Image: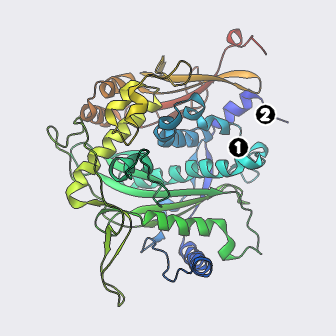
Amino acid sequence: MSASMEEVLSRLSDPLPVHVNSSATLVTDTDKAAAAIDRRRAKKRGEQEPSARKPGVIPLRDVDRQDLDITPWSLLGVFARATTLARHGRGRGLAEHWQCLKYCQALAAGSSGYLSLTDEGQSPELSYRAMQARELGRAFGLAVAERTIRSRFPDRLVSTLDAEAVLLAGFARSGPRPTLGARARPDFFVEAWRPGEPSQIFVVTVNGNHQIATKRTSKADRSVFKQLARGSERAEQFHLGRWNTTPCLLLSTELLAKEGVTVNALQAPGEGLLPTRPSEGRGNGDAVLTERNHTYAGAVKLPAADGRQERAQDGFLIPRKDLGWYGQLLARTGAAGQLAFAGASTEIAQYLTAKQGYKHYAQQTFAGSSSVRDARHKIGSTWYVGTDQVFRLNRRRVEAFSGMAEDLYELLVKGKLEAYRQRAYDLSNTFQTGTTAPQWGPVSFGDDGSVMALRALTKADDTDGS
């Protein structure tokens, strides 16, 4: 029997624990899966060299291995914030802007008391199953990644950006339809930042799976180990300044683990620092970004080691001289994502290059196709502006709202990115942190002044068609 709309809204705002697994055994099992992958490739394709993977992979610190306590709605908020620009830039439709809403009924407490998939979440359509694993896997993985980075840098704000949306500005291939193509790459970049100081960058790969592992499932056939091994390959494709100086987080979510949803996580250390951006002039966040055309083939130089000579491998390398440019790129792409999350339209274009999809935002779309910043709500003591959508949840009409603090939104619309960052940082400890709010159901507050909220509409608004 389907849960009522009231039950769904209630459980979306109830914090529940999520298992986090990170251990030396996980590293060993991932290495075994990687070796098995290499053997299969050698047999099938004749590849003799093992695939390039991130070296020095280790478990998370003890403090980062603790269970994650989070509400299902906050999980969906993490996913929405990280992917809005990437999805929105291609389709600009409400269905893509609000892609997280399809999981409102997919998560609840399991028999163990941990967050698990509901009956609905466990039986998606076959064509939908891979999408659910990918998207919910990313939601859980990113939530653990962001918590890990915040615990290491408690005095900074954390921004998560889709890696392809960023890399398109510097590596798109020539041709009528520039694209990164099938080149392996990380899924996300996470920037831990504070105005006037160097930013710390993390490379993140995230996956999910529906496998139910048994005692008869070999290590080489465990989806989680294979996903971590392949994630290590994707992480190895990006480097700041020179090879192996960029920290990464590798995550794989088991959605049907018997003890409840489990996030398996590993890391590789590195410096990953960007130079401090100037407060004004060239390289400032307010300045228009110039595209680059960095080399991909043979771009990464590996030092001589283990009896092997110095060699080169393909990859996305940001040269030392362009680290400042890359920091500017992250800041401006993040600003575009913030505006997209709030439903802005042509205002987004000012922060993007042509290869990133400037033209998709510079032109007006036809009526009804795009999210529009047309909603304003006071939640707590803060006025938020953004966009909303009304949809049916078990025959009852429900309103979803995503937006950002009004004064921060106005700064971004006016192109004042550095002022926005300073203001967002100054206010970060003043924004609400609860899981719900008066007149609303579940609410996901971001420490950057963003919000995603859900509420049932009144019966007066719910009379038609029900």
Apparent side of residue 68 relative to residue 133 in the rendered image (left or right):
left
Apparent side of residue 65 relative to residue 309 in the rendered image (left or right):
right
- Which residue is located at x 73 percent, y 28 percent? 5
Residue that badge 1 annotates: 108
For residue 303, which quarter of the picture? Answer: bottom left
Q: Report helix, strand or loop for mark 2.
A: loop
Q: Is residue 191 above or below residue 307?
A: above
- Which residue is located at x 54 percent, y 59 percent? 66
Rate crowding at label 2 as few (under 14), some (14 to 19) or many (20 or more) other CA atoms within 10 Å: few
Query: Can you name the residue that lies furthest to the bottom here?
Result: 307
Residue that badge 2 annotates: 3
Image location (x, y in percent) of residue 301: 30, 73
For residue 463, which quarter of the picture? Answer: top right
- Which residue is located at x 43 percent, y 32 percent? 360
Marked residue nearer the N-terminal end (2 or 1): 2
Picture colour scheme = rainbow
- How far separated are the C-alphas under marks 2 and 1? 11 Å
Observer-nearest residue: 71 or 78?
Answer: 78
Which quarter of the rendered picture does the C terminus lie within? Answer: top right
Image location (x, y in percent) of residue 124: 75, 46
Apparent side of residue 227 relative to residue 196 in the rendered image (left or right):
right
Give yes or no for contact between labels 2 and 1 (Cβ–Cβ under 8 Å).
yes
Number of numbered discs present?
Answer: 2
Apparent side of residue 60 relative to residue 454 in the rendered image (left or right):
left
Q: Amino acid at mark 1?
A: Ala
Image location (x, y in percent) of residue 113: 71, 50
Image location (x, y in percent) of residue 224: 62, 65
Observer-nearest residue: 188 or 312?
Answer: 312
Q: Report helix, strand or loop for mark 1.
A: strand
Whether residue 162 is visible: no
Q: Amino acid at mark 2?
A: Ala
Which quarter of the rendered picture does the N terminus lie within? Answer: top right
